[in-house]
Amino acid sequence: MTDYAETMRELMALSQRPAAMLSSLNIEGTKLTGDAEINDIVDDSRDVKPGNAFLCLPRACESADEYIASAASAGASAIISVSCLIEDSPLPLLHMKSIDTAGKVLRKWFAAEPLPPLIGITGTDGKTSCAWMLREALERYAGNAWSIGTLGWMRSMDSILPLPNTTPSLLLMHRLLAAATASGASALICEVSSHGIKQGRVAGLPFDAALWTNLGNDHLQDFGGFAGYADCKAGFVAGLAAEGKIAVANADDAEVGSRVPANTLSYGHGLDRSDDVDLGWRQNAAGELLLRQADEEIRVQDIPSGDFHAENLAAVALMLCRAFQASWERLPQLLSHMSTPPGRMQAVAAGSRHVFIDYAHTPEALERCLKSARSMASERLLLVFGCGGERSREKRPLMGEVAASMADIVWVTSDNPRGEEPSVIAAEIVHGMPRPCRAKLRLQLDRGKAIAEAVEELGFGDVLIIAGKGHEREMIVSGRHLPWNDYDAAARLLHEKDHSDTRACA
């Protein structure tokens, strides 16, 4: 992926619009003091250029005076303030109290029409895979579909630019929608994270449909516990359903099912469920995906490994039918031979050696990953994983318990320790492992060495899962962003192992 600066250059070029007066954005819920012509809106005072309006968001309130002075000195023509109390603005000021009003203001600024269908995907796990597969299917169906999320801003397989967050800032989200509109994209698919919802990064965006994949343990410390985290996601989906928009949810997740409104569409495992789901799915012994609605059944061939990918494809199928009116008969063409999302049960080696990279970083995702891996192992299941620092401590022992119960040998290692001591994180993981299971434990905090040890241990018929980082290309240690990619490391080690084995047989 290229530098984030290229993302912004592309976006600024695609989302340009004519200059207008600040007063044209004065809507219900805003207060205007003075007026000025503005040629664009930016939310970082360091990026201000002459004629820009500086958007001062709630996160900047504590230092608002400093940022506004910096914006003014850079040539800003106006200030747009959200929640921040600005007593003596040096520039014309448009003030509003809520982030929802800010969303409406930005929607008015980027007012290009007609908008492409806008799809939001939320859930603890599966957002990235669903976004990847829905984008690929829509590209086959209508051409030129875009997605936004953990992997970045994706316009095609050959065009993926980095984004700072799974769900970027409010301004960036609106700019991306404007760019998709100007480029004639057939759809824009957005991963909607819990933080993106809580911080109002999707305010004012006119979503046409929402998909809720599942609900597990992640980011609980930021929401006061599981209930707050669940309510955050539920509010996003229920809000769209209340507006008469399409909402799709996973019927196999009881926590999700108990929180969605009655008009939500559902998909679930099993083909004989026409009474309680809108679409049933099952994977057969050949790895094909069978889908059924009412009395109609179809078969989807050559799908990514892992039953969770089969489930994700079922969700995509239901969304294609209901939000995009794709015909049932066309689904096999749209969904068969789907590529594997990077770092989501991504194969590094096949044949007699199976090595997969997976982003699983919650107990639920790890369990599903290992369950799929176990079905492919004729011998042992090996696992390398860790937990990120400065993130949900509650899930660490839970992931340790899952690892110990499902894998034959477990390497506990580092995974983005950030500002925490890797040994402390590892100890909290190991704490969840029942003592009789700890004989299978290998504690190696150097991730590179842990993967090397696992590859060396790998035998014919074994399956190795390297979990937690997936597609990521860096390790965050004590504030430093160090280059690291699990796939590259595993591929190099496997190549060396194969070369060594070949020489030994010569």
Image: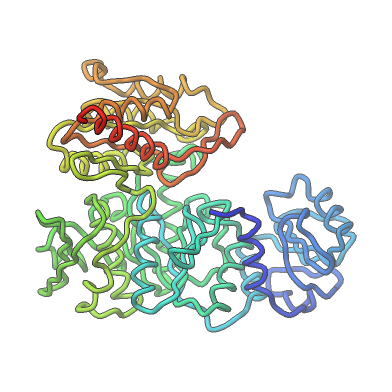
Q: Estimate the x, y position of residue 419 in percent, counting from the top left.
A: 57, 28
* Picture residue at 75% right of the left edge, 60% below the top: 81
Q: Is residue 436 left or right of residue 426?
A: left
Relative depth, front residue between 307 and 32? 307
Relative depth, front residue between 342 and 402? 342
Residue 80: quarter of image? bottom right
Q: Is residue 205 left or right of residue 130?
A: right
Q: Is the image coloured rainbow, by chain, by secondary structure, or in one colour?
A: rainbow
Q: Residue furthest front?
A: 506
Q: Is residue 12 left or right of residue 242?
A: right
Relative depth, front residue between 438 and 469? 469
| Vertical relation: 157 (above or below) 214 | below
Q: Quadrant of the C terminus?
A: top left
Q: Is residue 85 left or right of residue 378?
A: right
* Picture residue at 36% right of the left edge, 37% below the top: 490
| Vertical relation: 397 (above or below) 322 | above
- Total number of numbered discs in the rendering: 0
Q: Estimate the x, y position of residue 302 in percent, counting from the top left.
A: 21, 61
Q: Estimate the x, y position of residue 446 in percent, counting from the top left.
A: 44, 24
Q: Estimate the x, y position of residue 168 in percent, counting from the top left.
A: 57, 56
* Picture residue at 23% right of the left edge, 59% below the top: 303
